[in-house]
Structure formats: C-alpha cells, structure tokens
Amino acid sequence: MSMACRKVYIASASMIRVSRYFTKSYKELAFDVVDEISRNLSNDGLNNIDYVIVSNVFSDSMLDQLDISTILTQELGLTPKPALRIETGESSGLAAIAHAYALIKSGLASSVLVIGVEKSSEYPTTAINKHLTKLLDYEVESIYDFALVNEAAFLMKEYMERYRYSREDLSSWSVKMHSNAVRNPYAQLKFTVTKEQVVNSQVLSDPLRLLDSFPIGDGAAAILLTSNDGLISNSDYVEIEAVFQATALPLNLRDNILELPATKLLFSRLVKECKVDINDAVLEIHDSYSILGYLIIEELGLVRRGKAPEVINDLNNVNLSGGLKARGHPIGATGVYQVAEIFKILTEGLGDVRRNVTWGLAHSMSALDLNSAVVVVRRCR
Amino acid sequence: MVGGVSVGIISWGAYIPRFRIKVSDIARLWGFDQLLVKSLNIEEKAVANVDEDATTMGWYAARSAIMRAGINVGELGAIFLGTESKPYAVKPSATIIGDALGLPNKKLASDMEFACRAAGEGIRISIGLVSSGMIKYSLVVGSDTAQANPGDVLELTAASGAAAYIIGPKDEGVAYFEGSYTYTSDTPDFWRRDGSPYPLHGEVFTDEPAYFNHIVNSVKGLMSELGLRPEDFDYAIFHQPNGRFPLRVGAELGFPKDKILPGLVNPWIGNTYNASALLGLAKVLEEAKPGQRILLATFGSGAGSDSFSIVTTDKLLTRVNNALKVTDMLNNKIYIGYDAYAKYRKLLERI
C-alpha cells in the first residue's frame, strides 16, 4: 500500500464529564479515559499502539510538571512507547490529532493514542486567568494585563455597533449552547439559561458577561487513531479525511477585526480540497466567548456577515455538545473532546444525540484565531 | 457522648460591636459587581473598634454568660477560646479573659484553633469534661475580629463578634445536649500561613468539598445516631459564612427555610467566624420555648463540622432576660464608611 493511500480511522474515543475534580489528579483523569479505550478494544489492544501524544497547555505553570507525556506514559503502563506533548495554546487538542494523523499518514506509526488532559481547578480564578493571558504575546499584550476576555469584548462591541445589535440580541448563542449541553452527558454546565439571565449576569469586560464565557473546568479525553481496520469494532466507523492548520497575526495588526484570518483560510481549503457539504455535516466550533460563535459560523459561510445572531435557533448541527460555552473548555483537552464528540454523534451517539450525516468538522483556535486547526472526518459504513 | 446524656447549656452571652459598614460600600470601592453583593445575602457587617480584639469581645460575651447563669465563677473549671484572630501567636488569650473575669487559677485554659469551628469543638470537649465529672462548669468562648485581604471577596463578609457558653450539669441547664457528632478531614479550602496578615481561600473549593460536604456528613451522622429526622427539629442553625450557604445546606438536608431564618444573623452582621453559628444559637435561645429541639452545626475550614441536638428546658425563661440579648445588639448600630473601617481594622500600615 502506498503511503498516500493510507487511511486514518478513529478506532475508539472516550471522555469524562468536564467538571472540577477536587479529589483527582490529572493522572487519574487521564487514566479513566485511557482505561475506557483499553476496555473498548479487544485483548491487548493498547499494546498495539506506536505512539502516545498528550495535548496539555498548563502542566508546567499549574502542575509543576514538564514532559507530562513521559510521566503519563509511565503512569499508564505504556512505556517504552514514544511519547510527545503538543502545545499550541487553546487549539492544542486538534494540533495533537494533526500530529498523530501525520505520523500515521507518513507510515511512521500505524496506531497513535491521543490524550487531551487539563487540570486547572487546583488554582483560584486569578491564577488561571493569569496563565490564560500568556496565550497572547507576552511582551506586547499580556504584560499590560490585556487578556483574552478583553479582546473578545472588543469584538463584541464592534459587532454590536457595526451591525446595530442590542446586547440582548447577542445572547442567543449562550441560550442555544446551554440548551444543547443539557443532552450531553459530558457537559460541565447542564442547565438552560434565558436571554435575561445572560444580559444580567456579571460583567467580565463590558459588554461581555459571565454567561458569554466558557467556564473553568478540568477534563480528559482520549482517542485512538489507527490505519489498522482490524481495531475497528463498529459497523459504522469514522475516517479522518483531512487536517488543516494555520496561524494569523494578532488582533492589533488586522485590517478587519470581525474577520478571523486563519479560520477563513482553513474553511476555504475545506471546501476546495475536501468538497465537504456543510449541510451534510455536524460541527464543533471554538466558541470560548459567545461572540466567536457568531463570527465563526459567518466565516464558514453558513450565514452572511452580520446576520449570525438571527439564525442561531435554526442551527441544528452546530455544537451539539454545548460547545466551549456550556460543554466546557478544559483548555488542552478541548480539541480532543470535539473530535470524540463528533465520533460519538456519527456512530453510537453522544448520550441520545445522533446524526445521520456524512461529515464531521472540528474547529479550534487559540486566543482570537492565532493558531487554528480544522479536523475533517467522514462517516463510512 | 450519645447515650450518656448528662450535660447541658447553663447560659450564653453575646457581643456584637456597634459599628456597621454596608457591604455595598466595600463592593463599590473595589469595583465588585453589585450582583455579587446581592448573591451573598449580606447587607452589612459588624466592625470592631480600634481598641477591640478577640479577647475584649470574648470577655464581654463571657461576662454576659456568667451574669445570665448566676453561677459562682469559682466553679468554672475550664475556659476555652476558639478564635483565628487571637492577639498573640504564642501565649494564651484564654487566660487573659479568665483572669479578667476572676476565674480561679485551678482551671484548664487554652486557645483553640480550627478556623471557624474551634469553639464548636470547645463545646464538645466541655461535654466530655463535665460528663466525666472532672469539672463542674466549662466556659467556651468563640470570638473573632475576622481578617480579610483588602479588595478580596472575603472582605465583603469578614466581620467581628463574640459568643460565650457555659456548659454544665444537665439538671441546671436552660437546654441539654441529646447528642453531638464531629466530622473532620484534611481539606485545605481556606488558610492563613504563619506570619501572613490575611487568609487565602480556594474560591469554589470552599463550597461543595468543604462547607457542604462536612456539614452534611456531620448532621447526617448526628441524625442517624439519634434516630432523628429534620421534621423533629424546631430550629436549625448552620455556620454562616454568607447569607446563602446556610439556606442551601438546610435545603440539601431537608430543613425548611422557616426553621433556619430565626438563627440567621449574618445578613446584618457578616461572618463572625468562631461566633457565627454560636450567635445564631444565642438568638434562637432568646426566642425558643421550653421543650423545643434545636440543631446546631458549626463549620471550620481545613475542614470540619460539629453538630449538636439541643433541647430547651423550663429554666430558659428564668435566665433569658438576665443579660443583653443578641436582638438588642443587632439593633444598636452606628454606620461607618470604609475610611473609619480601614482605621479601626488597621488596614493602613503606619510606622
């Protein structure tokens, strides 16, 4: 078989509910998801893997741990498998999958275990926010205490002014995400909210409020990627069709702050190279702040610029998990959650949520589209 | 001590400083959202004067307890001071209060530290001392001038106050203990390192794993040992870090709001730490009738909770008016601004 034709399948995926795990360490969270993968496979399934890739952002700043992939590989009993940590900020999860995909595609590996794990609940919010701010350019932005939430608030203000929306108009995203999350067994915020609750919640950075933002939570998710179709047990299975990554200049160097340049590039390649039919797809997109949800679906071409807030109620295939807004955003693990959720929605179901569509699309970005990625999967049978 | 019931509450005393600061004033100064203030369900907090501390306030509450009891101080065989704001790191403060009140030298005396529940443990220890016959009466004082880092969310609630209880033979009591239960674990939700002027806390970690877990287990343990249900109690008093938690933990345990509200004092004085639940009990004793059953559950970070089932007796009515009541002190107040508060609580460092 020539390298170019090697297929990359998702053999198995597992998650724990995003939450604050006060009595468990990151090792135990990772163990729980890897153990489930192991049980999903037939005998000695995990022995067949060639590589362990760990997606994690804050291990050195919050857990005092460098080289977390080695420590986890030891803990999981997977030595002497090679191990690697991937970190590209908030998009680390998809970057890890991109790397696993490349290893398999190139023939350097045939099965790769990708683990996304993040444990932030050891620290108070001020410390977590301080570390999150490091995702921006420290010498230009972070040093002035300029944070992600401030940038998102800028976009929100500009969006409201340019397209003449009220604050309440921009609450539809959060309402929809919370209602989706209620059906997702792995979601952190499993409760509905009203527009009134959103506009009356605490101000984080005017006009952005608490219920426009992702919650802080711990999480772990794992997926097993393989070119070996013998590891696939379901009759419905999922193949990774393509992975795209791109970077962009910071907000202060952009001509139009309501466009997401890296994401725009990824979506154009998606259409050109994969011929993905968005209407025959489920999507998980990076809505860390509600305003980004609107901008991303506009960038995707699902709706004309400036019109997103009007169509949210009709979105039936976007962020069925509840998105970062309500499923939660365990930073380094989030991308792995997105792909695991899509895998379940296309196969056995995410809770009772299933969709009989061909495509699955996971989109993730760090900060405001600084380092972004899209993973495209296709359902086969 | 379940089984050998022989110990009661002889009397109680309270002290709430007159100064009050509106929590909304503190929130405005630091830029806290007023929604946060609303969610805490605390209107104002009591502020001790510049010359008050845990010993002076504790002394006042203890003196009231002695006046209300009408006992001879020579018969007090122990004094325990539960506080996390004692003026000396090394050297007891309980002895200061003891000598100021004229307690005999032949007595046990120590300061106890377990965040906000030290005085609660003092009561349990006293039950043991009295029921064993080692001493006749014990004086337990909970007193705090709670510290909070200026600008921290804790500053919205940390307040000053004191409560004192005399524990002695059941047949002399205004109430007696049916049972008690303690639940502790190493849960670092709130702490102050040696030498640090202000405590730190773990935000939401102080919530479920700490306050709720310990109180719920302590109260369930007590009710299960005594075979009691929430319906069997006329009042329920829980430690009061804010105005919301006691109602929430009560609901979780099955206690309706109307049994909790009579003992909920912190919306008007803030969190008085070691005096918090004990001032709530004092207020309930002032309005309870003989033969009523009261649940008291303390909580201290770090973490632990003591719960007590207390039944009032006929003697309650003969002693209730012998000293100043909590309700008198709740109504006797002078409002101050953040400037006076900063001065009285020594927030301005001078050399």
Image (spheres, helix red, strand yellow):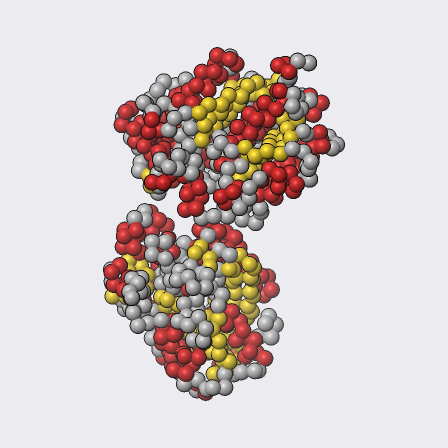
Figure check: A68 above or below B14: above
Residue A55, quarter of picture: top right
Residue A354 visible in this rendered orientation of the protein: no
Residue B217 % position (x, y): 56, 58
Residue B332 % position (x, y): 27, 68
Figure check: A234 above or below B179: above
Query: Residue at horizontal 56%, vertical 62%?
Result: B183
Which of the image's four quarters has the C terminus of chain B? bottom left
Give the camera-side residue of B256 and A37. A37
Query: Residue at horizontal 53%, vertical 83%?
Result: B135
Figure check: A66 above or below A222: below
Figure check: A26 above or below A269: below
Residue A27, quarter of picture: top right
Residue B61 % position (x, y): 38, 75
Name the residue furthest front: A139
Is B197 positioned to the left or the right of A317 in the image? left
Query: Residue at horizontal 52%, vertical 65%?
Result: B306
Give the camera-side residue of B236 and B26. B26
Residue B59 visible in this rendered orientation of the protein: yes
Residue A198 % position (x, y): 36, 37
Residue B73, quarter of picture: bottom left
Query: Residue at horizontal 40%, vertical 60%?
Result: B198
Which of the image's four quarters has the N terminus of chain B? bottom right
Q: How many marks?
A: 0
Is B43 positioned to the left or the right of B109 in the image? left
